[in-house]
Amino acid sequence: EAGVVQSPRYKIIEKKQPVAFWCNPISGHNTLYWYLQNLGQGPELLIRYENEEAVDDSQLPKDRFSAERLKGVDSTLKIQPAELGDSAVYLCASSSGGSSGELFFGEGSRLTVL
Amino acid sequence: AQRVTQPEKLLSVFKGAPVELKCNYSYSGSPELFWYVQYSRQRLQLLLRHISRESIKGFTADLNKGETSFHLKKPFAQEEDSAMYYCALRRGGSTLGRLYFGRGTQLTVWP
């Protein structure tokens, strides 16, 4: 199984440009997470989905960030317009719940804003 | 509020030596604690969780509620243990809730 798939792996853009990241979770995982990882820091949650519903988006900067998971499977995270401080790794993870609650992470999308 | 602290950004030991990666947390309720690991060029993955109380790849971690710690230990480090280790906390009673991560400790095991 491929695991959580993210694209693109790397993206370089100029400030004020838009950017979008895509995530395909593990089949059957209803819970999907987007985490932000700044250099030298641990991941921080941006948004969590249960199927197509965003159940925890308190840390998502809604003035420039948006996310969707229309059919409860794939998800897209968008930044518009990007700022220099958005340079980071954007991680997607999914979980099937159950007693373990283990998160399965993708390889991440590394964004560089010039 | 909850917080996870990993005081060591870098940790180096020689092969065969014991290793301990420190993790302290602050949370008023009953937390679930985890260790996630990221090997070079690989994705972040679960190493172990305190509820399972098992040893994975020779690593163990005991939740000490009195000291609010969840240190990761291995008696004899191996070169393949070199990786980035993240301690993480989840609020108790929420299997799918967010994880709060520490900043990570980069472990290097020298031959």
Image (cartoon, coloured by chain):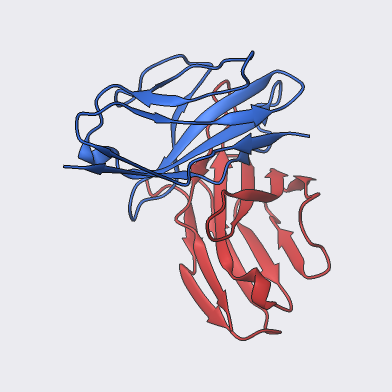
Q: Measured along the vertical axis of the image, is residue A106 above or below residue B101?
A: below
Q: How many marks?
A: 0
The x, y position of residue A32, in whole percent, is 62, 46
In which quarter of the view is residue A94 placed? top right
Q: Position of residue A58 (x, y in %)?
A: 81, 49
Location of the C terminus of chain B by quadrant is top left
Query: Is residue A27 visible from the viewing direction of this image?
Result: no
Residue A65 picture location, percent across and down:
75, 66
| Residue at the extreme right of the image, as rendered | A63
Please say if B90 is above or below A80: above
Q: Is residue A72 left or right of residue A10?
A: right
Which residue does the image show at 47% across and 50% down from the upper left?
A4
Inspect this view and state whether residue A42 appears.
yes
Work out whether residue B84 or residue A44 is closer to the camera in this orientation and state it: B84
Colour displayed for chain A in the image of the structure: red
Residue at the (24%, 25%) spot, across then down: B76
Quadrant the N terminus of chain B occupies:
top right
Left/right placement of residue B28 relative to residue B69 reads right
Image colour for chain B is: blue
Residue at the left extreme of this rendering: B111
Q: Answer left or right for B50 relative to A50.
A: left
Query: On the rendered structure, is B30 left or right of B73?
Result: right
Residue beneath the point at 82% across and 63% down: A62
* Picture coordinates of residue A3, whole percent (x, y): 43, 47
